[in-house]
Image (cartoon, grey):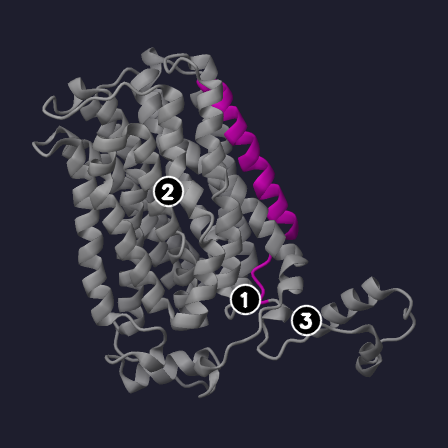
Amino acid sequence: MTAEVNKGPLLGMRHVQTLLIFLNITCLYIGRLNVGVCVVAMTNAESTNLDFPEYDWSLTQKSYIISSFYWGYIFTQFLGGYLCKLFGVKNVMLWGSFASGAFSALTPFFISFGGWQAYCGVRVLMGLAQGLIFPCIHQQLARWSPPAERNRLGALSHTGIECGNVCAMFLSGMIAKSPIGWPGISYVSAGIIFAWCIFWMLFAANNPMESRYIGQVELQYIESSLKHNEDYHKTIIPIPWRAIWTSAPFLALLVARSCETWGLSTLQAQIPTYMNGVLDMDMKSNAFFSALPFLTMWIMSYVYLIAADVLLSGNRLSLTALRKTFNSIAFWIPCATLIGIGFLDQEQKNVAIALMTISVGVNSGATIGSSLNTIDLSPNHASILMGIVNTAANVVPIVTPLVVGFIVEDEANRLEWQIVFIIASVLFFFGNCVFLFFGSAISQPWDAEDYLPLKVPDLTILGIHGASKDTDKIKKNTLESLER
């Protein structure tokens, strides 16, 4: 006989935390990605609002502006993972988000005084602020999500990426043509981040035990499902650095996320330029069709979420099989469509838009496929793993625009863009192959609160004999025995 578990209210505080994270990601991605539309608006005033200054920036200079956010972003990933363990997720996310909003509000003033160099500078500062946040998000999800709901709550919160993409592409274009012009893009982005900070201060909590609004039933459900004792939240668990860096599943995740970031950042940052140069679309059409792929991505993220719930609840796929299946779809379909895009020109713009929409829309499966894998591998060290992954993966968007700027000398040259898309396709294919062979969704031995690195002299206690001279083999056999 089985008893039904009382999970508390249908919409509890764990769902409020998920909503807050969703809104945070949306706000941050608007501030991060509106640069693609903003740069086009500032260098082509005829297509937006003639009442604001126009700048004669080269493609290389625009590439520097687009990539500059990530110059700062990669340096605070480790710091974000570490600070949230010391000061709590709530404080670090608040500091990072508020600072990002402040720098967004100051962007037009920086540009008026220092041109494209100052624009790069303020984008670097914004990147430093936002780099603190994503490691905290994964730690917050690990603390608030019961294992049975982790995939659902994690995927729901990460749909803020797609929502932010849509708003950055579509709303930014509309704002640029409005009476407040391209400076309004920065002001609106800052305003919504400041509004989010107010709600975060009121309703966020580092863990269920600290929440003022959570009911006793929901608190008991979350804490018991995570198998936390009363002293858990007061304990700082040592970080097993060596075990992390020698873990094959983690390294496979690192490679997969880096390759995926290259392909997606190529689409995110370069779609407005590609449509303006190769497909010869005006700014109003550019804004709509630039947003269309990401609107599809947002819709598809919920399709993936529903499909994942059905497959997991019916025990049709294990979590590892589900992640690898969705990741393959998210990587390999864009791999094929990106190559096709490079062979199209103005006369086939509808086909190009359709293929681009498919590429970006299908890629949303990577959230369930690999993005949430840090929490699978180690709930206790999710912020640290995310810090490492995001640092490596976000070196890529620094390089991608620079590579595009080096390859594409003429924005209207279809052959040059073809090379850009083929490179992205190759990396999509390779990254998923690595994840298929070495990836896993099983919690690793080094995630345990009492984990200690195994020493060879102590292995005889576990009853393993016959290979005392072969240290690596002994360790491998021991870990496999413990997992079984």
Q: Nearer the viewer, residue 199 or 99?
A: 99
Q: Where 478 falls versus 245 (above or below)? A: below
User: Is residue 247 rendered to the left or right of residue 98?
Assistant: right
Q: Secondary structure at mark 2?
A: helix
Residue 95 in view: yes
Inter-mark Cα distance, 3 to 1 = 14 Å
**Residue neighbourhood size for the residue with mark 2, other residues' Cα within 10 Å, grouped as few (<14), some (14–19), many (≥20):** many
State the image quarter where residue 378 is shown: bottom right
* Chain-order first, disc 3 or disc 1: 1
For mark 3, what is the residue?
483
Q: Nearer the viewer, residue 109 or 358?
A: 109
- Looking at the image, is mark 3 or mark 1 nearer the viewer? 1
Main secondary structure found in the magenta portion: helix
- Looking at the image, is mark 3 or mark 2 nearer the viewer? 2
**Please, what is the three-letter code of the amino acid marked with disc 1?**
Ser
Marks 1 and 2 close (CB-CB < 8 Å): no
- Magenta range is 417-443
State the image quarter where residue 458 is shown: bottom right
Q: Is 441 covered by the magenta stretch?
A: yes
Q: Which mark is residue 378?
A: 1
Q: Where 34 falls versus 343 (above or below)? A: below
Q: Where 309 falls versus 85 (above or below)? A: above
For mark 2, what is the residue?
124
Residue 375 in view: no
Marks 3 and 2 close (CB-CB < 8 Å): no
**Residue neighbourhood size for the residue with mark 3, other residues' Cα within 10 Å, grouped as few (<14), some (14–19), many (≥20):** few
Inter-mark Cα distance, 1 to 2 = 30 Å
